[in-house]
Image (cartoon, rainbow, N blue to C red):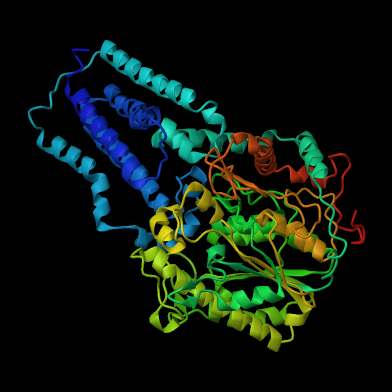
Amino acid sequence: MNKLKGSKLSLIVIATVLLWLKTYIVYKTSFDIKIENWKQEFILFINPLSFLLFIFGISLFMKEKNKNRYILITSFVISFVLFANVVFYRFFNDFLTIPVLFQTSNMSDLGSSVSDLLSVTDLIYFADFLLLVLIVKFKPNFISSKSFTKVDRRAYFLIAIAFAFFNLGLAETERPQLLTRTFDREMLVKNIGTYNYHIYDVFLQSKSSAQRALADGSELVDIDNYIHANYKKPNDEMFGIAKGKNVILISMESTQNFVINEKVNGQEITPFLNQFIKESFYFDNFYHQTEQGKTSDSEFLLDNSLYPLNRGAVFFTHSGNEFNATPEILKDYGYYSATLHANSKSFWNRDIMYDSFGYDRYYSLTDYDVSDENSVGWGMKDIDFFEQSIKHLKEMPKPFYSKFITLTNHHPFELGEEDRLIEPYTSGNKTVDNYFPTVRYTDEAIKLFIERLKQEGLYDDSIIVLYGDHYGISQNHNKAMSEFLGEEVTPFVSTQLQRVPLIIHIPGQEGKTISTVSGQIDLKPTLLHLLGVNTKNTIEFGSDLFSKDKMEFTVLRDGSFITKDYIYTRETCYDKMTGESTDDAACEPFIEKAAQELEYSDKIIYGDLLRFYENNQVHNSTFLKNEPAIDTN
């Protein structure tokens, strides 16, 4: 190893050490990675090393003129990948995946959200690269020009391999079956490092691409049996109570449940919703179950009662799949279906995916009169959006199934003074402070929309469903949220903050608050049963919210779950009554069930298994497309 003192190794050492230390510093300052003991801290410290040794070691096989260029380019690319994860983490509190990187059609619409996440000081993330450029340019005396032999290269890579196995071995002792529990990206980054995680992600993407080609209908047998065994009979009093009614769904962007019946600066945040829930069914223990697909994930859950993927968005990765979505089912009951959203057709690949779901029409950006005056943040203001949507609603054939997607309450929560109905909060955190005025604005927009529905004679002949699509305030703002809530945002509290409003208004029905633990995956069977559509023989993981037999059990995409008495998150079981951790034995009966549901749902999506179900290849089951909606057993 004495010969490993030449220019190649010297520059390799400098590049490796600089990136190694920078990565660890980023771990500690830019990511919120939970460390429980000294071994986890040590693993976190060493985990970038093996990858960096391998990637820079490739230059040992290059000719002299290409070596420095390769090291510089590689250093920049790795730094950019690390920085991209930092920016993504700032809002989503998550790490990038390959499917997310391919969602390029979304980038042109990100606009203010991305710029709000960037800062001039971010140049420091590339300081080591700039230092390498100076070293290569000025060639200081400590850079030697000695060459390497085959023995030197062999010794180098043996050391790199030894570090890799040492890292993986330590990680396995700390977290057994690490590479099989892939829904927890933080755990992967903590144990094998950001760069090795991305390599593993490439492997997972390749694996998922092969799953469809190799899939066959036999894989649905166990899934079909599981779903039928867990089927819950509808409530006889509620089944068909809204038969023939129009359906108006409103997806409330980034609206979390903690704003309901709450005040800021002495004023109600959601005065209209607070009143509307008194004459509607209000579910106050209803959780969003989205992942990297955010709003598109909530739409996927709503229409399919399947879990989203833990990597990327189904809207992008599997838009060509066969689905049995609500709009397609309702066609056979005479329903016209449409989505209304004043955004680009291609955003989240909606123009393709809506067709796969069976929607008849997508009213997108070109169907609205959008100007600078009626736009803010991500696009058209909600008040103008709803007002212009009335004409589209009136022209739809009846009965219709319509979905409205709001925009104003979207990060970075921008709103002009003229539209503010309440003043921002005063925590000093821009994101949290500005969140409340935009929520209040959307509340006002919905109020005006409901009034217009009454004026147009649509209100009494429609069921109206309002639901939050996903969180608005990520865990990166826990300090400000702790101030607002008056309590520390622990993992238990953070999970509770994933509750979003669900309000179902049915003409002629009195209001009622229902505290059953539930999630977005339950919306499809609930709505179909209200309309009198039998779902007994369909593939879905949700259950009717009004069913008297509904199990209080909701699974989040990261593997966390909520029951009537417990919350399980970050491998810790919490008592809901006290908020304190308790014996894991209390949660153990549900851990396997949660993992099994996620696994089954993933198999359906990755293998496109519903193409076989529709062809009656599972227990000779059939969809109930042409069956009268009368049997509730």
What residue is drawn where x is 46% and y is 71%?
Answer: 436
Residue 346 lies in quadrant: bottom right
Image height of 471 relative to 160, above or below: below
Q: Estimate the x, y position of residue 418 in percent, counting from the top left.
A: 41, 84
What residue is drawn where x is 52% and y is 39%?
Answer: 184
Task: Judge from the rendering whether residue 267 lies leftward or rightward of residue 462; answer left or right.
Answer: left
Task: Judge from the rendering whether residue 485 lies leftward or rightward of residue 127; answer left or right.
Answer: right
Q: Estimate the x, y position of residue 324 in percent, counting from the top left.
A: 75, 53
Q: Nearer the viewer, residue 140 or 305?
A: 305
Q: Nearer the viewer, residue 407 or 242?
A: 242
Visible in this render: residue 74? Answer: yes
Image height of 623 relative to 258, above or below: above
Task: Judge from the rendering whether residue 174 lies leftward or rightward of residue 499; answer left or right.
Answer: left
What residue is drawn where x is 81% and y is 39%?
Answer: 225
Q: Which residue is outermost to the front?
A: 578
Q: Estimate the x, y position of residue 538 in percent, counting from the top left.
A: 81, 50
**Quarter of the N terminus within the rendering:** top left
Q: Estimate the x, y position of residue 115 in percent, counting from the top left.
A: 35, 62
Number of disc labels: 0
Residue 444 lies in quadrant: bottom right
Q: Which residue is outermost to the top?
A: 151
Task: Judge from the rendering whether residue 597 lies leftward or rightward of residue 233; answer left or right.
Answer: left
Q: Which residue is outermost to the bottom?
A: 455
Residue 608 lies in quadrant: top right
Visible in this render: residue 385? Answer: no
Q: Nearer the viewer, residue 253 or 151?
A: 253
Image height of 166 relative to 329, above or below: above
